Image: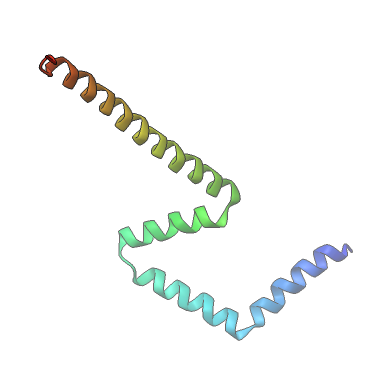
Amino acid sequence: MDTSVDAKYKTMYEESLNPFHVFHRRETTRRVRSMGVLDRLIYMFSSAVVGSRRARMIMLLYVALLHLLVMITLYRTMLQADEGSFERAPPIA
């Protein structure tokens, strides 16, 4: 038999016997069940993002693109406002 498979299942078996691990899992389940629907959805989403490296990278890219979009929008709005103010400015004598 493969020793890596034995080690994997041995670790899982030992964790299932650990009373602190069992208590932690039970308390986590109890707390999640006592949450409201919106809180539970946010908890599930954040657990999925934190639990996966790929999800963290996608979230980082998404947040960076949102910041870039806001900066470009503010910059374009600023340029349009400046162009309009020069047209309405009185001539310099």
Given residues 87 and 35, the one toward you in this image is 87
Residue at image x 34%, y 35%? 70
Left-right relation of 40 to 25:
left
Residue 24's place in the image compared with 67, above or below, is: below
Q: Residue furthest right?
A: 1
In the picture, residue 93 is in which quadrant?
Answer: top left
- The mark tally for this picture is 0
In the picture, residue 63 is in which quadrant?
Answer: top left
Q: Position of residue 6 (x, y in %)?
A: 82, 68
Residue at image x 58%, y 52%? 52
Q: Position of residue 33 (x, y in %)?
A: 38, 70
Given residues 70 and 59, the one toward you in this image is 70
Q: How is the image coloured?
A: rainbow
Residue at image x 53%, y 78%? 24
Left-right relation of 2 to 46:
right
Q: Position of residue 21 (x, y in %)?
A: 59, 79
Quadrant (top left/top right/bottom left/bottom right) for the N terminus = bottom right
Q: Position of residue 72 (x, y in %)?
A: 36, 30
Residue 63's place in the image compared with 73, above or below, is: below
Q: Residue furthest front?
A: 93
